[in-house]
Image (cartoon, rainbow, N blue to C red):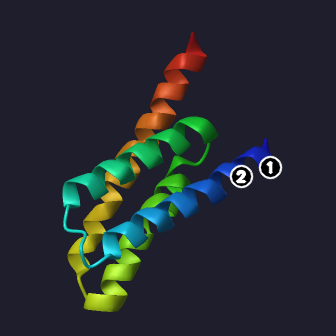
Amino acid sequence: MKNKFNLYFLLAEFSGLAIAWIDSQPTWDDTGITVLLILLASTLFGFLTFIRPWLIALAVSLWIPLWAIMSTHNYGALLAFIPGFAGAYAGYFIKYLISKK
């Protein structure tokens, strides 16, 4: 179980990095799609891991605020944590409902 979590956590980090890379491109100006990608990735990994959804949320959504604060001092990017946590806990809750049956 721990090895499975480590694999999914690593994949969650890579997906968060990929989303942050896409978001940091100069031609990218679509916040809605970025938010949707964070929500979908965190929901998927929250569902797959079923433990520590807060850690999955951080793994996916940490990179955008980190990049924005370091490069442009944009603290409004901290709002990226909202879809990250919402998605991770939604995935966790969906898995809970499925496993409860």
Q: Residues within 10 Å of mark 2 (few under 14, many from 20)?
A: few
Residue at the image point whose x is 21% and y is 74% from the top: 76
Q: Are marks 2 and 1 in contact (CB under 8 Å)?
A: yes
Locate residue 5, reporting x and y percent. 70, 48
> Which element is circle 2 on?
helix
Residue that protrudes farthest toward the top in the picture: 101
Task: Name the one closer to the observer, 72 or 75.
Answer: 72
Q: Is residue 61 visible?
A: yes
Residue at the image point whose x is 51% and y is 58% from the top: 15
> Which element is circle 1 on?
helix
**Residue at which label 1 appears:** 3
Locate residue 95, reporting x and y percent. 54, 27
Task: Name the one closer to the observer, 7 or 51.
Answer: 7
Residue at the image point whose x is 35% and y is 45% from the top: 86
Q: Residues within 10 Å of mark 1 (few under 14, many from 20)?
A: few
Q: Is residue 50 visible?
A: no
Give the tally of numbered discs. Answer: 2
- Taking the image as shown, residue 45 lies to the left or right of residue 9, namely left
Task: Name the one closer to the observer, 39 or 54.
Answer: 39
- Taking the image as shown, residue 18 lies to the left or right of residue 35, namely right
- Occupied quadrant, residue 23: bottom left
**Residue at which label 2 appears:** 7
In the picture, the quarter occupied by the N terminus is top right
- Tell me the CA gap for discs 2 and 1: 6 Å
Residue at the image point whose x is 57% and y is 15% from the top: 100
- Taking the image as shown, residue 46 lies to the left or right of residue 86, namely right
Locate residue 39, reporting x and y percent. 36, 47
Going by the numbered disc 1, the residue's amino acid type is Asn
- Occupied quadrant, residue 50: top right
- Occupied quadrant, residue 101: top right
